[in-house]
Structures are given as C-alpha cells and as structure tokens.
Image (cartoon, rainbow, N blue to C red):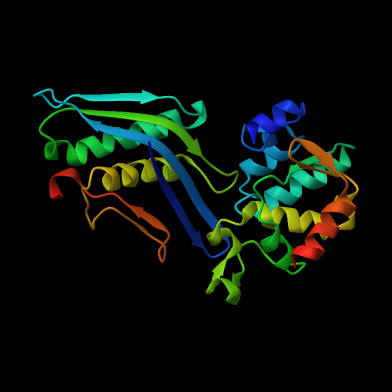
Amino acid sequence: MQNYTFRKQIKNRGCYAEIIFEANLLREEYSALEIKYLADKEWEIACKAGVLVFHNYFGWAFSGGLEITIYEVRWLPADTDNLIVLFATIEALCEALNVQTEKLKFDTLNEVFLFPERRSL
Amino acid sequence: MGRFAKSNNALSMLENAWDKIPGYKALKSTGSFDQFEYAFKFVCDASINTKGKILFNLDGVNLEVVANIKPGTGLFEKLPQYGGESLWEKGYITEWEASSLLNDKKYLQSVEFHMEGKPVPTQKVQKKLKTTN
C-alpha cells in the first residue's frame, strides 16, 4: 500500500488530499486499466477521473495493463475539493509509477492547476 | 476519527457531518469557509449555540506541540520555530484545534476531551500540558 500527500498552503488557505492506494502493473499484453475504488464515496468521481487522466497521459509508458486500487482518501473540510483530489491522484500515480512531467503542476504563485495537453507529453 | 465519533454517538468531522449543522451548508455555498479556521470555529460556536458538546479525541495528538502554541496563533501563520512554516503546513491541525479550544473559556464549557477511549477532565489535560511544556 502506498501513501501520497498533497499539501500546499496559499496565503491563508490550505489545499490538502491524501491518497492511500496501490498501483500494480499487469502482465496482459494490451493496455487495460482496472480501477478498484474502496474509499469515501464523496471523492469517487474525482479520484477515478484522476486515474483516467493519468492513464491518458502515461498509459503508453506501460507495456501491460494497470490495476489501481484506492483504499482511502483523507481530506479536510474547507481544504479539500474535487480538483485537489483529482490532481493529487494523478501526482500519486506519477510518483508511484515513476513517470514525471514538469508540465503537470500546481502553480502556487498564480493559484492555478496546470494540466498539459496529452500529446505534448 | 469516524470510529471515535461512532463509539460516542457523535457526528464525525470527516463524514460531511458539518453539513448537518444548521446554517453551515448555506454559509459554505457562499464561499465563507475558504479557510479551515473559520469553518472550525463556526462548528464550535454552533455546538455551543445548540447546547451541544464538542468531543475531542486527544489520542495521537502531540501534546508538546499543543503546549507550545501561543494563544491566538493562526493555523496558517508562518512560525519561526517551524522554519517559517505554519502549523497547517507541519500537519499540526489537530494540535491547533486542541489549543484553540483550551485557550477559549467559551469553548471549554462545551468540550469533553477523551484519551485512550475515556473522557478525561479538562483540568487533567491542562495539567498534563503544563508538565509537557
């Protein structure tokens, strides 16, 4: 089981999400994606969207399939929302599966999330 | 946290319980709770105003940190003792909450602290903090 914490403070506001998950490469020859979501229903759509966006970005990097299990999403009132969970999920998978891009980032100065166009990666 | 709330027949902070507090949802939708501090204080005030009780689980809380938080310190205030980071950035949110309650007479009347699954008198918590500091 792996743990990824997204925690950024902008002025007097916090942005927080913690993703407890497991990412396994599958041996299938085709690029299948399996998502098991076992966490709080509140964040299911954002989390699954994060997994799908990650797979869109980096699915090509894996020869086989990918099995993602989300066990828990830790959150805070006021400091967590869908976009934060989505972004944290993508970052969690990037870190776990060792794929990185400078283009995906949270710009704290301008207070914006930056999502690259897939084909630019 | 959910288990603690359930075993005490209370609302948990992390199960959208705050939405059940009268007025919270309406205020939240106006964006008034951009800061965690305001949301937390609103919930504490609401508990008092509705003659409710705040159950606070101290298990896992770093009492040394609580003891060293000066009254009135903001959760997002950058602190020199933490290398210019805030209590929020250090992950000491629960510690800040405990300190806020302990330093406010108004809240103290409505708080019931728990340790190791049992309620502990506030005076005992305060004494423990003095010896920790």
What is the tally of numbered marks visible in this picture?
0
State the residue lying farthest toward the bottom. Answer: B80
Task: Give residue B107's position: percent from left, percent from top.
Answer: 85, 51
Vertical arrangement, residue B41 with respect to residue B5, above or below? below
Task: Give residue B130's position: percent from left, percent from top.
Answer: 81, 65
Residue drawn at 69 percent across, 37 percent down:
B18
Vertical arrangement, residue A37 with respect to residue B122, above or below? above
Vertical arrangement, residue A60 with respect to residue A40, above or below? below
Q: Answer left or right for B35 relative to A29.
A: right
Residue drawn at 18 percent across, 27 percent down:
A26
Asked whether B57 or A78 is in front, the reply is: B57
Q: Answer left or right for A76 relative to B42.
A: left
Task: Give residue B8's position: percent from left, percent from top.
Answer: 77, 29
Asked whether A93 or A26 is in front, the reply is: A26
Task: Give residue B48's position: percent from left, percent from top.
Answer: 87, 43
Vertical arrangement, residue A37 with respect to residue B126, above or below? above
Looking at the rendering, in which quadrant would you find the N terminus of chain A? top left
Residue drawn at 27 percent across, 46 percent down:
A94
Using the rendered view, name the quadrant where residue B64 is placed.
Answer: bottom right
State the residue lying farthest toward the front. Answer: B131
